[in-house]
Amino acid sequence: MPRIDTAAGRDALSAVAAAVAAGQKPARQEHAAAVRYLLQLLVEKAPGNSVEVRVPPFGAAQVIQGPRHTRGTPPNVVEMDPQTWIGLATGALTWADAAASGRVQASGVRADLSGVLPLRP
């Protein structure tokens, strides 16, 4: 996945926020860029291979130090929709609220991202 520079990532986040505030569906390209930019920041903040964070259809990343996963489904998986990911990463949504409402599917002993979220985009 090519690196998204800070200005482009922030522009994508702003465009998505503006579309959502206007009650519109964000443009796919901007939505994808915003999700991938935030995943990139997560990898920088919490490097590792023990947890796979999935945000279909736009991206996935392996993060958090711990046992390396190499084959099959990882033992620690976190999956959510793009708007939930953007909310968690920017601090608009808490991990506890997202988990309690079922907006996050997390499995595995390391699958709680509350210690590394929100990010500072």
Image: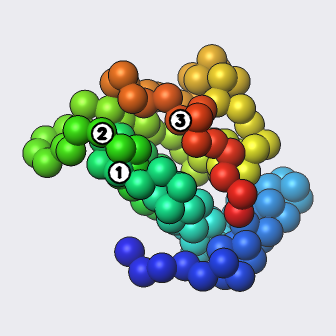
Quarter of the figure with the N terminus: bottom left
Which of the 4 image quadrants contains residue 95?
Answer: top right
Crowd tier of the residue under label 3, counting other residues whose Cα lies within 10 Å: few below 14, some 14–19, many 20 or above: many
Mark number, residue 77 = none
Residue 56 visible here: no
Left or right of 101? Residue 17 is right
Please tell me which of labels 3 and 1 falls first in the chain. Answer: 1
Q: CA distance from mark 1 to mark 2?
A: 7 Å
Mark number, residue 48 = 1
The amino acid beneath tag 1 is Gly
Residue 69 visible here: yes
Residue tagged 2: 66
Crowd tier of the residue under label 1, counting other residues whose Cα lies within 10 Å: few below 14, some 14–19, many 20 or above: some
The amino acid beneath tag 3 is Leu
Which of the 4 image quadrants contains residue 32?
Answer: bottom right
- Please name which of the two marks, 3 or 1, marks the residue nearer to the observer: 1
Left or right of 5? Residue 46 is left
Please tell me which of labels 3 and 2 falls first in the chain. Answer: 2
Secondary structure of the residue carrying tag 1 is loop
Crowd tier of the residue under label 2, counting other residues whose Cα lies within 10 Å: few below 14, some 14–19, many 20 or above: few
Quarter of the figure with the C terminus: bottom right
Q: Position of residue 107 (x, y in %)?
A: 37, 25
Q: Given contact means CB atoms under 8 Å apart, are the residues at marks 1 and 2 in contact?
A: yes
Q: Residue furthest left?
A: 71
Q: Residue furthest right?
A: 22
Please tell me which of labels 1 and 2 falls first in the chain. Answer: 1
Q: CA distance from mark 3 to mark 1?
A: 13 Å
Residue at 71% x, 82% y: name it: 7
Q: CA distance from mark 3 to mark 2?
A: 14 Å
Residue tagged 3: 113
Asked which colour scheme the image uses, the reply is rainbow
